[in-house]
Image (cartoon, grey):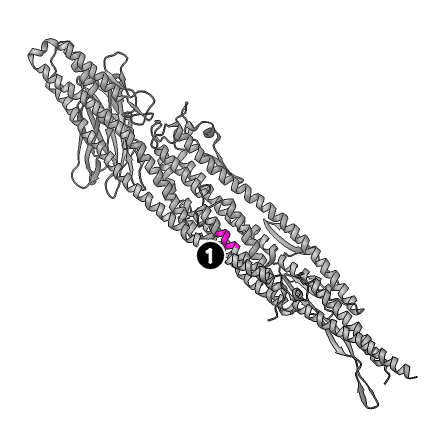
Amino acid sequence: MALTKIFDISSRSLAVYRRALEVTSHNIVNSANPNYSRQRIMFETETSNLTAGIVWGNGVRIADVQRLRDKLVDSHIISTNQKYYDSNRQSELIGQIEDIYSEPSDLGISNLMTTFFNSFNELAVTPNSSPLRTNVMNAASNLSAKVTSINESITSLKGDIRQEFLQKVNSVNSILKQIHQINYEQFSNAYNGVPVNDLLDQRDALVDELSTLVNINVVYDNTNSAVISIGGALAVDRMHSSEFVAEEVNGKLNLKVKDGTYPIVLTGGELSALSQVYSKKIPAYQEKLDAIINKLVEAVNSEHVNGFTISDPQETGLNFFEGYVNGELIINSEIVDDPNKIAISLDGTEGNGEIALRIAQLTDSKLLNGNTLQESYSSLINGLGNDGMLQSNSTQANQIVLDELDQLKASQSGVSVDEEMTNVLKFQRTYEASAKLITIADEMLQTILSMV
Amino acid sequence: MRISDLMISDNYLRNTNSIKDRISVLNRQILSGNKIEKPSDSPVGTSRLFRISDQMGQVETYQKNIQNSLSFLDETVFAMESIQSEVMNIVGKLTEIQNPINQGNMDVYADMIDNSIKIMLDTANTKSDGKYIFGGTDYSDKPYGVSSDNQSYEVNTDTSGKINVKFSQSVVQSINMPGLELFGTIVSSRGFFNTADAVGTVTNSNSTVYDNLGNEYQLQTNYQKTAANTYQMTYDIIDSGGNTVFTVPPAVKTLEFNSLNGNLVSVDGSTSNLSFDVEVPANRIHFTMNLKMLSENNSATSVNLTANQPTEIFNTLKQISSDLRNGIVPTDEQIAAVEAFNSRLTAKQSEVGNTINQISTLENMLSQQSFNLQELAQDENGVDVAKAIVDLQNQDYLLQISQKLGSILLPKTLLDYL
């Protein structure tokens, strides 16, 4: 066997460990990159050869650079992401609605409604007192302003939600395009023998991001292309990617495939949260509030209309509220201009406050499905609070699962600098030893040459 | 388990974050003093808070109502006391006049009585909190005044109205003494009709009423049964010469009784007003006809009319004073009328006193209730500050320890030792 074989083995080893150090350094510099999967060099012995009945080792070579990733954890993360981001976004949005209602506080409808009825109760003591009449007026204006402002804020919140839905649909489309591109590139690169590990990391990050937006199902085909469907509709594979559009039908926000007919059933991710709150939750709260305010208007007016004003000339048949139109609670402008037109006298004398007593009594009347207005409002807020609590609890529960899965993922795919540094030392030593072998082989060659 | 660097830093961040989250919640609670900041903090608690604050608002209103009513009632008592002192004064003078020695100074006594009438009239027109104390609910004019011919005193407004005030969930109490009850005439129709009477049966009842000048009239009422539980009422006022000065029809009143308990339900369709005013301006007749005491049952029909005084006090006094100026000594009937007014005044004073007592008792109950409600609200929403501060301290220690540990562990790798 020729002495030069030592040169061969050593120089190959130098190349292998240089490459190993490259991979290690790639790992180290990406240790803070959460989307990075650590890569591992798979060494193997070079094929030996058999000469003169003896097996001669040929040194080391790199079999593969592996990307360490647990597919099972990945798919769990994808499904938990959908739940977490759905409940988290719903919890945030309901939190905003709670802020709009500003309960429980002195500024909420509950307290303003109590104050409104109480102001009538007080007015009954001295029905001709103008400070008390102004007091009723103020209580009514405060209530009307709060109701109106709640409805305005909810409308503007709905506008924001619609806008966000549109943006998120754009994000989905853009992610799908990128995944499609990577599907294609990783296939052709793998085919040409170009390493694709970093491309796959990129694709995994995109799939994760997509799962925060919408409910997806991911499988990998035999060319390692990600085949993703959204709510059953094919979204992307190696050959093509679909485009999705948002549409609003009958006050409901839907997602559907462009040119498709049926809306996609949204069950997870932020798009589901947005659609759920926009299409179901807000209209349900709105309906209850509208019923309460409409009843309030109707009940107060039905008493007030029988009363006499103390204005000159005296009037009767006046409504207290002009109405509740487009979310605006409007007080009769005549009364706003002249509180003496609050008609609380039953017999026309200015000291009679019977109607005021009757209006104050409405607070205890079971006006709405066997409940008082306060009780109905309380049940509205109770429902809102329960929705909020449910989503927030679900968010916390999913957060725990997600944290656990992230730990598992980090354990499998995360970089440990200690481990990498140990490898650096190991590879460096082997590299040095290989270099030393070349020197020794050279010296041996010199020795033989000097013999000549 | 293999531990990577990202795991250690993520763990550290997550744990410090959750500690900071708890600190921020405790901090907010201590600063605001409220446990429930939004409905989702405690949906049931929020509902309970609504109920408590609703009740608190109502109790506060009732308390305000009581304060305002008490001052009004105090004024009423004061006014009644002033009137009574004048009436007592007059009663004394009337007794003095009975003594023939004093009968030479009748004009002086007439002056004194006129003076007392002025004071009484002035007091009867007292206002408190923008309301005429004895003016009922009609404040369009002073309730009592002198007629244009200066011959008599007359009532300018309807003084029968009652100011009803709500003092608690179930107590609605009238807080004023209607002038009509104190100074005026109320004719009550009392008794019952027999349910077995045939349709068409007519029941009559008579009573004497007086005009402002003390002249006598006969009030005749007729009730005719028109259907089951329904009667039509007509009435005539006839002067001493037998002439009818006022007659109804055409304005018949329809009375309806409850078929089960026999109580009067409505007069001319109105369920709230079971009395009506009868006014004959030409004859200075003014009284209120009260039908509340009528009912229907299965015993024999018997209906009576009763008037609460023979004549109205101001005009009685006016009559006495003008008689005195003409050298006529007050009659026993006149003196009896003044004394009757005096005793009615006392009775009405005790009525007002009762109302004051009743709402003062309510006031005590309400302040106790308000205290209880505040305690309930505290239980529901109040932060136990001592506990919160201890918790905060605890979380602060945890944060410090984890930061300390983080600062030791996080930066270390093999690199540090190479």
User: Dividing the image into 4 quarters, which one contains the N terminus of chain B?
Assistant: bottom right
Callout 1 crowding tier (Cα within 10 Å): few <14, some 14–19, many ≥20 = few
x then y, percent, for residue B412 = 62, 63
Outermost residue, bottom direction?
Answer: A53
Q: Nearer the viewer, residue B384 or A142?
A: B384
**Amino acid at pointer 1:** Asn
Percent coordinates x, y for residue A216 in the rendering = 64, 62
Is residue B347 in view from this perspective? yes
Front residue of B384 and A374? B384
**Relative to B224, A54 lies left or right:** right
Instruction: Residue B224 in the image: state x and y as whole percent.
Output: 23, 33
Can you tell which quarter of the image residue A153 is in? top right
Question: In the visual, does A106 lie left or right of A447?
Answer: left
The answer to whether A283 appears left or right of B211 in the picture is right
- What is the span of residues highlighted in magenta in the rendered image? B20-25
Inspect the magenta stretch and tell me whether residue A372 lies in it.
no
Q: Secondary structure at mark 1?
A: helix
Residue annotated with mark 1: B394
Quarter where residue B302 is shown:
top left
* B345 is higher (above) or lower (below) than B272: above
Please identify the dominant SS of the magenta region.
Answer: helix
Where residue B288 appears, x then y in whole percent?
A: 25, 27
Q: Which of B322/A118 is in front?
A: A118
Question: Residue at 60% of width from left, 48% of height from top?
Answer: A161
Residue closest to the far right? A452
